[in-house]
């Protein structure tokens, strides 16, 4: 399993890719909690959450998650994609959508909702876009950050949204939750939301937190409405054994987060001034326009992320991704190789 290393065709590589930022996917401690959970709940729970037989672990986990994120209420679903689609589909007939550039396809209603543009430029024109619509209700959809180009978004503009509109703000925090915000609690409590704005944060549970599932955070009224939707009622829930393990793992997540921050700071001290990377403080993704870095490092038995995204015909996106399992020696070896890269 890729953690700090990956074995491909019998050859060992240092692994600086993927999105398991906290390294939970290869944590022995988490696997032990998960085994306990399977002994309680089995390998899957094949039922609707709204059936007449219900497992308390879902309510316990959702209460814990809401408290952690600073939200009034939370909902777990089977995937981050389901979290996004459940939410945007519910609001399809409840107002006019305005999509930010690069919004993840999981929170889009159709392919044309996805487009490339500069986020700050979009923000500067947002008031004009809102004023140009006669709809009384607006649904704004955006990511919390850009994990591909390693750009952190500023949300000060939320406090200035016009009060003559009912605004629902849907933020996809899949690449932030677990590592950004206060102790990894993500973006929900970081947003200064005026009374006329209904904030909803959706997220994958499977990136930093390493749990196959999805999350929705909002006020209790909104979460209760989503629970009544056909998308939620007819879908399979997250595997309960993972929620059991999650509830056991507070100290583990805190420890892994501290290890990740130390590793990110270490790499930043070595390669942050190389001129190769775009990045922001404490975030484990380092983007480069130098796509030749990937084959150069591969020859030195180091794998970084480099593939076309989101469509196979799009340009390559090359990134170094740090996780909590990397050792200081791993990072120093990567740093030495980067110093040798002729594209610097």
Image (cartoon, rainbow, N blue to C red):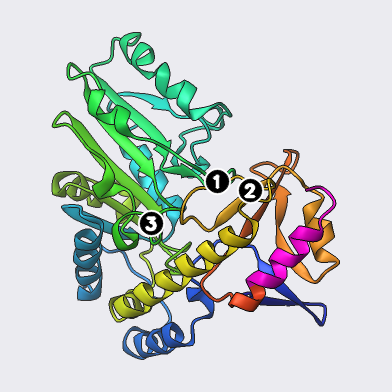
- Name the residue that disc number 2 marks: 287
Report the front residue among 327 and 135.
327
- Kind of element beneath mark 3: loop
Residue occupying image coordinates x 81% and y 65%: 298
User: In the figure, 112 relative to 226: above or below?
Assistant: above
Disc 2 or 3, which lies upstream in sequence?
A: 3
- Name the residue that disc number 3 marks: 177
Can see residue 15? yes
Specify the principal SS of the magenta part: helix
- Name the residue that disc number 1 marks: 150
Residue 221, position as x, y percentages in the image: 14, 45
Mark 1 near mark 2, Cβ–Cβ under 8 Å? Answer: yes
Determine the CA span between mark 1 and mark 2.
6 Å
Alpha-carbon neighbours of circle 2 within 10 Å: few (<14), some, or many (≥20)? Answer: many
Q: Which range is magenta?
A: 331-344
Report the front residue among 11 and 277.
277
Alpha-carbon neighbours of circle 1 within 10 Å: few (<14), some, or many (≥20)? Answer: many
**Magenta-drawn stretch contains 326:** no
């Amino acid at each position: 399993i890729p953690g700090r290393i990956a074995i491909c065709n019998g050859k060992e590589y240092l692994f600086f890719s993927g999105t398991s930022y906290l390294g939970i996917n290869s944590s022995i401690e988490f696997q032990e909690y998960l085994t306990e959970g399977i002994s309680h709940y089995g390998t899957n729970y094949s039922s609707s959450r709204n059936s007449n037989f219900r497992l308390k672990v879902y309510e316990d986990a959702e209460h814990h998650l809401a408290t952690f994120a600073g939200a009034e209420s939370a909902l777990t679903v089977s995937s981050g994609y389901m979290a996004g689609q459940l939410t945007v589909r519910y609001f399809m007939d409840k107002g006019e959508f305005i999509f930010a550039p690069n919004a993840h396809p999981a929170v889009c209603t159709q392919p044309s909702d996805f487009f490339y543009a500069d986020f700050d430029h979009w923000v500067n024109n947002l008031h004009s876009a809102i004023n140009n619509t006669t709809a009384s209700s607006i649904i704004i959809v955006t990511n919390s950050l850009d994990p591909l180009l390693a750009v952190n978004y500023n949300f000060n503009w939320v406090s200035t949204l016009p009060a003559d509109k009912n605004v629902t703000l849907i933020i996809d925090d899949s690449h932030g939750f677990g590592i950004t915000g206060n102790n990894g609690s993500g973006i929900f409590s970081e947003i200064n939301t005026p009374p006329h704005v209904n904030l909803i944060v959706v997220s994958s549970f499977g990136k930093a937190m390493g749990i196959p599932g999805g999350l929705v955070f909002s006020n209790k009224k909104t979460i209760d409405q989503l629970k009544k939707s056909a998308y939620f009622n007819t879908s399979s829930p997250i595997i309960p054994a993972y929620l059991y393990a999650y509830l056991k793992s507070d100290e583990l997540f805190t420890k892994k987060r501290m290890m990740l921050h130390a590793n990110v700071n270490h790499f930043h001290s070595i390669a942050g001034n190389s001129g190769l990377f775009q990045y922001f403080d404490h975030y484990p993704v380092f983007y480069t326009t130098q796509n030749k870095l990937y084959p150069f490092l591969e020859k030195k038995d180091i794998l970084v992320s480099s593939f076309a995204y989101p469509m196979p015909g799009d340009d390559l996106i090359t990134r170094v991704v740090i996780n909590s399992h990397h050792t200081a020696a791993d990072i120093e070896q990567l740093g030495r190789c980067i110093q040798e890269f002729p594209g610097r």
